Structures are given as structure tokens and as C-alpha cells.
Amino acid sequence: MIRPIYWLYIAHLIETLDARARRSRTTNMWTDNLVKTVIIMLNFSRGGHEGDWSLHLLAAEAMLPYFRSAGCHNYARYGAFYIHHMKGLPPETMKKLQHDAFVRHIPGIYK
């Protein structure tokens, strides 16, 4: 489950970046093409490392437009397939995944 404080921080960061991007075309280009994509990749990595299933799916879904625009058609196609099937899992399986069942936790690392 996405930690509320983390989500508020990211939402505030995106709002600040969007406000600054409206002032300058160069800032807009850097924000859209680099900063937001790096945030998405970091969220994907964090979701996998911490066992945060909802953050993992959210970041995977946010990557799809970038795969399409970069011409990575197989990533876009199979990424959409993956997300569709993961969101359609039975409730008991989804509950297990939301409670760190998809990552092996080694004490002292990441959490």
C-alpha cells in the first residue's frame, strides 16, 4: 500500500514542477522528458524493493505512454497485458500481494 506521507510528497513535488513548467518552455521540456520519467522509474523500483504492490502497479501503468512514444511496442503491449491481468486477480491473491507476498524480505535491507 502506498504510504500516505510519500504520496503527499510526490503530489506536492509534481504540482511544484508543473507550476514552474508553465513559466518556461525549457523547464517544461526538462520536467516532462526527464524529471517525471525519473520519478516514475524510482517509484517502480521502490515498489518492487519495498513490496508495495499498489505503487508497483501505479508506476508500471505510468510507464506505458513512454514505452509507446519511444517505439518500444512489445513493452507497451505486454505491459498493458500485465497490468490488466494483475488488476484482475482474485481478491485473496490481491490481498496477499498487498501485504509483501511478492517480494522476499531480507531483514535490514530496504525496510
Image (spheres, grey):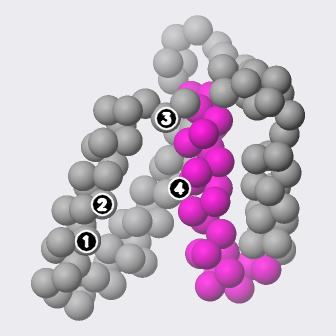
Query: In the rendering, at what x and y percent does residue 88 appear?
Result: 82, 46
Identify the residue under disc 4. 41
Query: In the rendering, at what x and y percent does residue 72 appear?
Result: 74, 79
In contact (CB < 8 Å): disc 3 and disc 1: no
Q: Which residues are magenta?
A: 48-73
Q: Disc 1 and disc 4: Cα gap in Å?
A: 18 Å
The amino acid type, in three-letter code, at marker 2 is: Ile
Point out the residue furthest to the front here.
Answer: 91
Q: Disc 3 and disc 1: Cα gap in Å?
A: 22 Å
Identify the residue under disc 2. 14
The amino acid type, in three-letter code, at marker 3 is: Ile
Identify the residue under disc 1. 18
Element at badge 2? Answer: helix
The reply to whether residue 49 is visible in this rendering is: no
Q: Nearer the viewer, mark 4 or mark 2?
A: 2
State the mark number for residue 2: 3
The front one of 105 and 102 is 102
The amino acid type, in three-letter code, at marker 1 is: Asp
Who comes first in sequence, dot 3 or dot 1? 3
